[in-house]
Image (cartoon, helix red, strand yellow):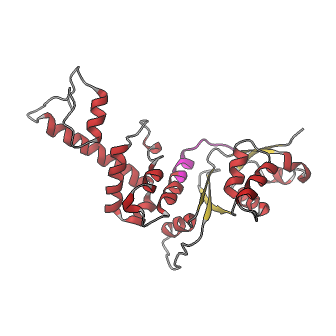
Amino acid sequence: MTISADFDQDAFVRALLDPELPPPKGVEASHGFPPQRRFAVYRNNVCVGLVDALAERFPICVQLVGDEFFRAMAQCYVRERLPRTPMLFEYGDEFATFVSNFEPARELPYLPDVARLEYAVGAAYHAADAAPLPLELIRALPLDRLESATAALHPSTHVIASKHPIVSIWRWHMSDEKTKPLELNRGEEALVVRPELAISVSTLPAGGSAFVDALRSGGTFGEAVNAATGVAADFKVTDCLRELLVAETFVAISLAH
């Protein structure tokens, strides 16, 4: 597309987002095609490319609502939020929030949290690498000092607390065998980690997300337990630690002096 020297970038972005606006100043005719037609083609190509990127990033959401509905919803998102960086794998970080306010999707209350889980899976894939703490070193830690210890989590770690069974929904749609019906009237807390090449998606006991968030913020294990029990009075710290260890979530544990 030919652009002249008096090109206005802000006007270009506004016209790109709003199909009702005319081509911005500086977009010129070329090879006999008027600016209106050339810019309309460009606008459509940009929109289609971004919608395709969202469909690739949120494949379970596509399955849940169908391709036609998803693409219509994604087009609305694209018109509100263009990518902030040239790295398309980062695009869609606000998609879940958009979906939660998208009126036609209100009949699927679990859809925003499924989108959050899918974005976390993609973010984990692109996260920095780090060596998980060997299990034998963790087992050697003195239990009486663990309460005051702090932990460093793998950079790929994400947790999502949902009122809906988002991990079960994700697994059901990822599986080729869909024999058992899903029970939707319960919540789940998701843990996403990529310690090596494979991404682990598992569930934490109630309060587990608060536990992980407290550790991530620099809190001790004792403070993390308090944060978790503040959310779920029956928080099972042993079960939570087991899931975190199996997923290889820890890269360091520091004992207080």
- Asked if residue 45 is positioned above or below residue 108 in the image, the reply reads above
Q: Which residues are magenta?
A: 120-131
Task: State the image coordinates of residue 78 (x, y, percent, origin top left).
Answer: 35, 46
The image quarter containing residue 246 is: bottom right
Q: Nearer the viewer, residue 154 or 148?
A: 148
Queried whether the magenta region covers residue 43, the answer comes back as no
| Residue at the outermost left position | 32
Q: Quadrant of residue 25?
A: top left
Is 128 magenta? The answer is: yes
Front-lying residue, 197 or 16:
16
* Percent of width and height locating residue 34: 11, 35
What residue do we see at 36% from left, 65% from top? 66
Where residue 198 sits: x, y (%)?
59, 55
Instruction: Name the residue located 45 percent from the left edge and 62 percent from the top edge.
Output: 60
Q: Is residue 11 above or below residue 50?
A: above
The foreground one among 195 and 72 is 72
Look at the image and tell me in which quarter the C terminus lies: top right
